[in-house]
């Protein structure tokens, strides 16, 4: 088994809270080690040195691409840089693991897929909710036929007040690609589609709203700590989006995501309904609704605390690189995701359903 040498580009919140701690465990397992740290603000590379004291630091990611000893580039930058760095890295002979979203346009994500195919380099995008114990349990049960035909559902991530980095890149469309739809929607739409068997989307409709750009209420979401706030900065994205997706197999999915809306409390969820049973997944906990011997029953499988989705996703990636596992994510799934998100934005702008 090879221990892959990794260069991490972007040392902000998502890297320091999830990726870099995960690598300490993967290093112990002989899967990967961080040898280079990059951030345009060089001071952000210093805290990770507590975990990786022998890693070198740089403000220019090209230094990592030129390093022939580095095998993998892990991208944790603002959204608009994902495709740029990923494509350059694969052309430089590096495998790429990238934070979600895959890209901010369909053209970019398709080019990422094409470059992966042309270079033979493995491209995988973070889909951490797939790798929670509850999600894997549901996947096995669904594949076993316990839920029957999964034909409809709803998913979302609703926050009462939780706008990340207000005025910074999160709320600047040119850099983020959008608001909660592209930030949070990726998580829950992907988990729903993954559990449905990744059906091909064929039509999308949506609506977006921006009602809280000038709201100064304090955040009640820990996730609002992501990003860096900027006074009098840009806020040209939505704070709430709703949508509806139709799939080639006839299944449908409702979507609702928000950074700010007057709901009771923050929650993320996936609810899917099958011909034999249905379930609700919320914050990694599940309830199953079915029937036995003509009697309706509810079940709540117990998994304990589980916050290792990011670590498990990264572990899976390096096991794929070592030929130990087959990939649970392929780039075409990323293409489908960005097509859905862009179509939902287009539908919101035109008031019409968009055919894919």
Image (cartoon, rainbow, N blue to C red):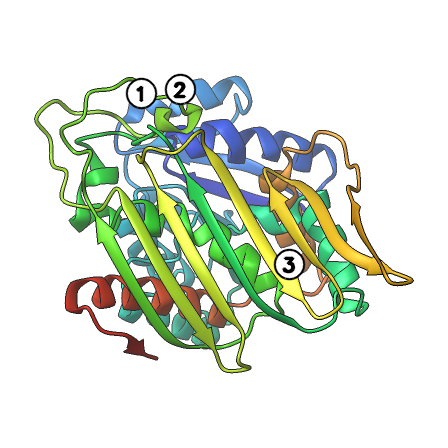
Real-space Cα separation, disc 2 to disc 3, in angstroms: 29 Å
Q: Which mark is residue 321?
A: 3
Task: For label 1, count other residues whose C-alpha is less than 10 Å away and answer few (under 14), some (14-19) or many (20+).
Answer: few
Q: Compared with residue 114, is residue 27 higher up or lower down, i.e. above or below? A: above
Real-space Cα separation, disc 1 to disc 2, in angstroms: 6 Å
- Do labels 1 and 2 touch, CB within 8 Å? yes
In the picture, measured across the screen, residue 23 lies left or right of residue 77, that is right
Q: Nearer the viewer, residue 62 or 237?
A: 237
Q: Which mark is residue 227?
A: none
- Do labels 2 and 3 touch, CB within 8 Å? no
Camera sees residue 8: yes
Q: Residue at x 62, y 53 (%)?
A: 317
Q: Residue at x 82, y 59 (%)?
A: 291
Q: Quadrant of the C terminus?
A: bottom left
Q: Secondary structure at mark 2?
A: loop
Q: Residue at x 25, y 47 (%)?
A: 176
Which percent across, then down, holds residue 194?
59, 62
Real-space Cα separation, disc 1 to disc 3, in angstroms: 31 Å
Disc with the residue nearer the chain's start (1 vs 3): 1
Which percent across, then down, holds residue 280?
63, 49
Residue at the spot of label 2: 46
Disc with the residue nearer the chain's start (2 vs 3): 2
In the picture, measured across the screen, residue 251 lies left or right of residue 242, that is right
Q: Which mark is residue 43?
A: 1
Q: Nearer the viewer, residue 247 or 28?
A: 247
Pick out the residue farthest to the left: 232
Which percent across, then down, holds residue 3?
67, 45
């Amino acid at each position: 088994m090879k221990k892959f040498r990794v260069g991490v580009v972007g040392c902000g919140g998502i890297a320091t809270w999830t990726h870099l701690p995960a690598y300490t465990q993967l290093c112990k397992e002989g899967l990967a080690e961080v040898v280079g740290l990059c951030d345009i603000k060089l001071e952000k590379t210093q805290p990770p040195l507590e975990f990786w004291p022998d890693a070198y630091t740089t403000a220019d990611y090209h230094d990592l691409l030129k390093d022939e000893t580095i095998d993998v580039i892990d991208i944790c930058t603002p959204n608009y840089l994902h495709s740029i760095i990923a494509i350059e890295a694969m052309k430089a002979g590096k495998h790429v693991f990238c934070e979600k979203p895959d890209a901010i346009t369909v053209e970019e994500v398709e080019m990422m897929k094409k470059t992966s195919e042309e270079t033979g380099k493995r491209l995988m995008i973070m889909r951490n909710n797939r790798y929670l114990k509850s999600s894997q349990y549901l996947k096995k049960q669904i594949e076993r036929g316990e839920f029957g035909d999964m034909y409809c559902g709803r998913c979302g991530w609703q926050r009462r007040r939780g706008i990340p980095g207000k005025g910074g890149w999160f709320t600047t469309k040119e850099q983020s690609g959008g608001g909660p739809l592209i930030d949070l929607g990726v998580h829950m739409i992907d988990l729903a589609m993954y559990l449905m068997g990744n059906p091909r989307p064929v039509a999308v409709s949506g609506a977006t709203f921006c009602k809280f750009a000038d709201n100064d209420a304090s955040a009640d979401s820990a996730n609002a700590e992501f990003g860096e706030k900027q006074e009098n900065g840009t806020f040209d994205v939505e704070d709430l989006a709703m949508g509806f997706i139709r799939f080639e197999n006839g299944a449908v999915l409702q979507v609702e995501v928000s950074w700010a809306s007057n709901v009771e409390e923050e929650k993320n969820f996936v609810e899917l309904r099958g011909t034999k049973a249905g379930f609700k997944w919320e914050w990694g906990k599940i309830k199953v609704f079915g029937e036995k011997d003509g009697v309706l029953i509810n079940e709540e499988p117990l998994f304990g605390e589980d916050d290792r989705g990011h670590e498990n996703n990264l572990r899976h990636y390096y096991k794929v690189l070592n030929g130990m596992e087959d990939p649970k994510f392929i780039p075409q799934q990323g293409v489908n995701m960005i097509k859905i998100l862009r179509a939902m934005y287009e539908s919101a702008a035109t008031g019409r359903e968009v055919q894919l």
